[in-house]
Image: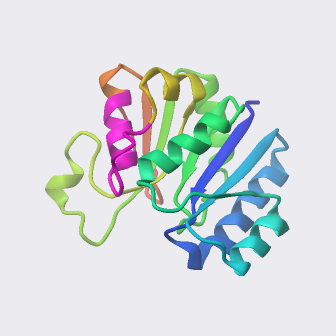
Amino acid sequence: MHSYSVILDARRGHARLGRCLAGLARDFGQTPTRHEIWLLVDKSRSRIERLAEAHGARLLLLPDRPRGQRLNIVANRSQADVLAFLDPATDPPPGWLALVDQALASQWDVVALISDGWLTTHWLARLPGGGGRIRLLAMRHSWFERVGGFDPDLEGTAERDLLARLRACHASVLQRRMGDGQRSAG
């Protein structure tokens, strides 16, 4: 089994952060593996500090920087085999860790879990990369380094841009829609 660095940008979705961390604890408890959890924050909040302490997460204060740059900073500090960028507004689906680990142990280089948003239109979902919001983007650390990480100037589209560049460099991508069992390779 790989070692994991789970990275959550707590600047968004912090209202659901407790549920997300509980889901991570559930899966890491069922599949013991070496892991670390990073919470990126823009300012100190006692609630987030308590959650980090309760779940053994590392807090990293990074104010006034674009999302891509924040995610790069923590990814570059990680020594794990696999980087998993998780949307903190997500309740990790049961078994996500086993799915990612099995996929990365076989023919896949990247795993993306995507959920449909209320703005996703039918035609947008058919485009390469699809519509919807990237809830989890997990990859081997070596692939992250190969494509140069996130674009440090991007904010809201950082994950989508990185996924597109991984595909352009011929990484094998397992993409699944959360909740419907569909998958596509890219």
Residue furthest toward the left?
123
Q: Position of residue 158 (x, y in %)?
A: 37, 48
From the viewer's perspective, is 125 left or right of 159?
A: left
Report the magenta residues as a range: 150-166
Q: Is residue 45 shown above or below 139?
A: below
Q: Is 145 covered by the magenta stretch?
A: no
Task: Where is residue 177? Give x, y as percent.
Answer: 42, 52
Answer yes or no: is residue 71 visible. yes
Horizontal arrangement in the rendering, residue 140 relative to residue 120 (left or right): right
State the residue lying farthest toward the front. Answer: 64
* Picture quarter with the C terminus: top left
Of 52 and 98, nearer the camera is: 52
Q: Quadrant of residue 185?
A: top left
Q: On the rendered image, what quadrant is the N terminus found in?
A: top right
Residue 52 drawn at (x, y percent): 76, 66
Q: Is residue 35 above or below residue 166?
A: below
Q: Which of 172 and 77 is in front in this view?
A: 77
Residue 115 versus residue 164 in the image, above or below? below
Q: Can residue 108 be seen in this view?
A: no
Residue toward you, 59 or 186: 59
Give the residue at x 27% y 54%: 131
**Can you give x and y, in whole percent of width and height, for residue 164 in the image?**
31, 35
Give above or below for 143 relative to 3: above
Residue drawn at x 51%, y 25% is 145
Query: Which of the 4 image quadrants contains residue 133?
Result: bottom left
Report the coloring of the rendering. Answer: rainbow
Examine the structure image and report whether residue 164 is included in the region drawn in magenta.
Answer: yes
Number of numbered discs: 0
Name the residue located 19 percent from the left edge and 63 percent from the top edge: 121
